[in-house]
Amino acid sequence: MSSGRNLAYTPIDNSAVQISRDVASGKRKAAEVLADHFARIDANEADVHAFNLVMRSEAQAAAAAVDAAVAAGRRVGPLAGVPIALKDNMCTRGIDTTCSSKILEGWKPPYDATVVTRLAAAGALIVGKCNLDEFAMGSSTENSAFGPSHNPHDLSKVPGGSSGGSAAAVAAGFAAVSLGSDTGGSIRQPASLCGLIGLKPTYGLVSRYGLIAFASSLDQIGPFAHCVEDAALLLETIAGHDPADSTSLNQPAGPYVPAVADGLANGLAGLRVGIVTELTGEGISPDVLARVEVAASRLRGAGASVGTVSVPSTKLGLSAYYLIAPAECSSNLSRYDGVRYGLRVKGDKAANVEEMMALSRASGFGPEVKRRIMLGTYALSAGYYDAYYGQAQKVRTLIIRDFARAYKDFDLLLTPTSPTTAFAFGDKTNDPMTMYLNDVCTIPSNLSGDPAISVPCGVGDDGMPIGVQLLGPALSEALLFKTAAVIEKGN
Ligand code: GLN
């Protein structure tokens, strides 16, 4: 049973949609909305540790600008006055961006990530940079160099990861919404563990410009929110082509908000949903499986037909991911050499540049990051490349094909998000494999590039939140929101 204190916040008039409406109409001031959120930060952040950095004065200046615009009768953006938190792997110009790693100590990016620019233009108030597993590698935030974040629903439990701070910030009412990044499940798993909506968009839908790379072919930025409509609004604001990201899709994105009302008003008649058999068996806790059944019955209640579907290669996703992601990370993280960014070990020990680089990396990276760099370097090395990296890429192709086949018969797929509810600190830190197994249901859609959403659907035997996952083909975000809204309504 739950043993830690519960600091979870339930918004009533504080959904992002409601805040932006109230602020734009002059009913509430952005400064008041912000003060309300800062009151909760001041009261509870010491216990939750959602943030690496709270940006109080910057957020206050942004709120004042929104209030001045409203007072002057100028048009304000779709997120006017909405407090938002960012995972601390998104670049903010002149403001520390740490990836929760010591190696970036003191580094201040010279530019803003595209998502940051878009949020500012939309009138959002950035309240802080959130804690994460170092360089987004992990499932609990226990790999942060600055100590873990705590699950607001039970402070003795992890919030999930790697975007655990972003999830905790929203669940604790420190921000109305937040952004995380998802390489193998890092938005959806913490969303599930903290009772939130979390969406990983189609690869290329949201610009990665200014997102510090972990595994570039898998990374995507996406929203955390208390409700589906807020997630849709936030995605609408950040999605869309960006010439600064060469992998950005060059086509229109959204709208997504109307899909929510559509699902609630018109139901899901004709929608075909398949429960993935390979991801609803062994290794998934019975209370989680029970909630997948509940979600299925809600979908049936709205007129959808729900069957089962086999997507055999999803079982291989985990093994392929833990070769491809480390391979890409070993290459991406080679830039942290003590010369160009952050930490540099100097002094008597470093007799030459090579030693300086080795010592800087040895003291700047934590154990999980080092493990991934070693795994990745090994998988890419001559003689092993074909057996490991090459083979993993073949599995990736199989997964893409298997999904395409499943989407001939089904519009969307349904699975658990995480095999269990939130676990206690230290439960899985001794054995990396048990930590990696957390990602079994979320990884396949990173490998295929398709979108997926985690929707809260009740609680487990321990009273902790459980999310279910809807998967869809590329660019099916509107349909995912529409369908998620039906599951949400039953809560
Ligand atoms: N937990 C996974 C990992 O450790 C996923 C991380 C992520 O999505 N950033 O790699």
Image (tube, rainbow, N blue to C red):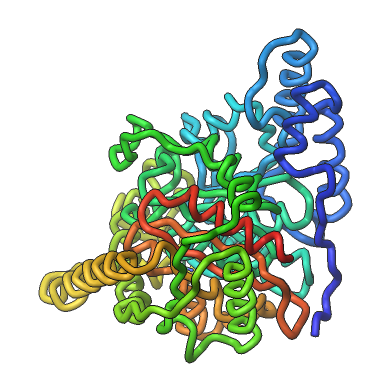
Q: Quadrant of residue 80?
A: top right
Residue in view at x 28 percent, y 38 percent? 246
Answer with left or right where residue 90 lies relative to residue 65: left
Q: Position of residue 309 (x, y in %)?
A: 38, 78
Answer with left or right where residue 478 lies relative to residue 12: left
Q: Position of residue 52 (x, y in %)?
A: 66, 50
Q: Position of residue 18 (x, y in %)?
A: 76, 37
Residue in view at x 67 percent, y 71 percent? 158
Of residue 34 and residue 488, the one placed in the foreground of this image is: 488
Of residue 197 and residue 52, the one placed in the foreground of this image is: 197
Whether residue 168 is visible here, answered yes or no, is yes
Q: Quadrant of residue 190?
A: bottom right
Residue in view at x 67 percent, y 69 percent? 457
Answer with left or right where residue 147 lies relative to residue 111: right
In this rendering, the answer to whether 282 lies above or below 275 is below
- The image quadrant where one finds the N terminus is bottom right
Of residue 307 and residue 161, the one placed in the foreground of this image is: 307
Q: Position of residue 33 (x, y in %)?
A: 82, 35
- The image quadrant where one finds the C terminus is bottom right
In this rendering, the answer to whether 35 lies above or below 136 is above
In this rendering, the answer to whether 420 lies above or below 187 is below
Q: Quadrant of residue 86?
A: top right
Of residue 299 and residue 473, the one placed in the foreground of this image is: 299
Outermost residue toward the bottom?
282
Whether residue 377 is visible here, answered yes or no, is no
